[in-house]
Image (tube, rainbow, N blue to C red):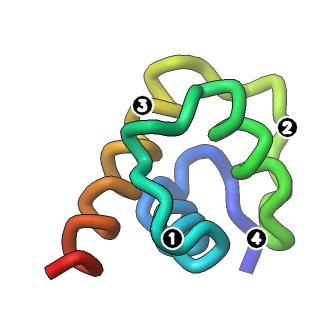
Amino acid sequence: MELTWQDTEDIAIQLIEAHPGVDPLTVRFTDLHAWVTALPEFRDDPKKSNEKILESIQMAWHEEYQDAQS
């Protein structure tokens, strides 16, 4: 499965698996960008991201994080 910037939910799931216990709201966008582009299935152009996309990924990741905490 290839991931692009539009695959917010799938990216969030992979991030919670790759970085368990990390509160997504503490992650800087520069680090989030690096972590997303480092995912093995990520195939999109790293330059196509923006603050809105990263915020969407962060919020989806936060939802997954909250679910895992309960």
Which element type, helix, strand or loop, lies under badge 1?
helix
* x then y, percent, for residue 55: 42, 31
Q: CA distance from mark 3 to mark 4?
A: 21 Å
Which residue, given by chain and number where applicable, does mark 1 sit on? 16
Q: CA distance from mark 1 to mark 4?
A: 18 Å
Q: Toward which corner of the image does residue 3 lie, by quadrant?
A: bottom right
Taking the image as shown, residue 54 lies to the left or right of residue 24, namely right
* x then y, percent, for residue 27: 53, 37
Q: CA distance from mark 2 to mark 4?
A: 12 Å
Residue 43 against residue 50 in the figure, above or below? below
Q: Toward which corner of the image does residue 30 lie, by quadrant?
A: top right
Q: Amino acid at mark 3?
A: Glu
Which residue, given by chain and number where applicable, does mark 2 sit on? 45
Q: Amino acid at mark 2?
A: Asp
- Judge depth for marks 3 and 4 and give the one in front: 3
Q: Which mark is residue 55?
A: 3
Q: Pointers 1 and 4 in contact (CB under 8 A)? A: no
Which element type, helix, strand or loop, lies under badge 2?
loop
Q: Pointers 3 and 1 in contact (CB under 8 A)? A: no
Residue drawn 79% across the image and 40% down it: 34
Q: Which mark is residue 2?
A: 4
Could you classify mark 2 by the number of other residues whose Cα lies within 10 Å: few (under 14), some (14-19), or many (20 or more)? Answer: few
* x then y, percent, for residue 1: 73, 81
Residue drawn 66% across the image and 73% down it: 18
Q: Amino acid at mark 4?
A: Glu
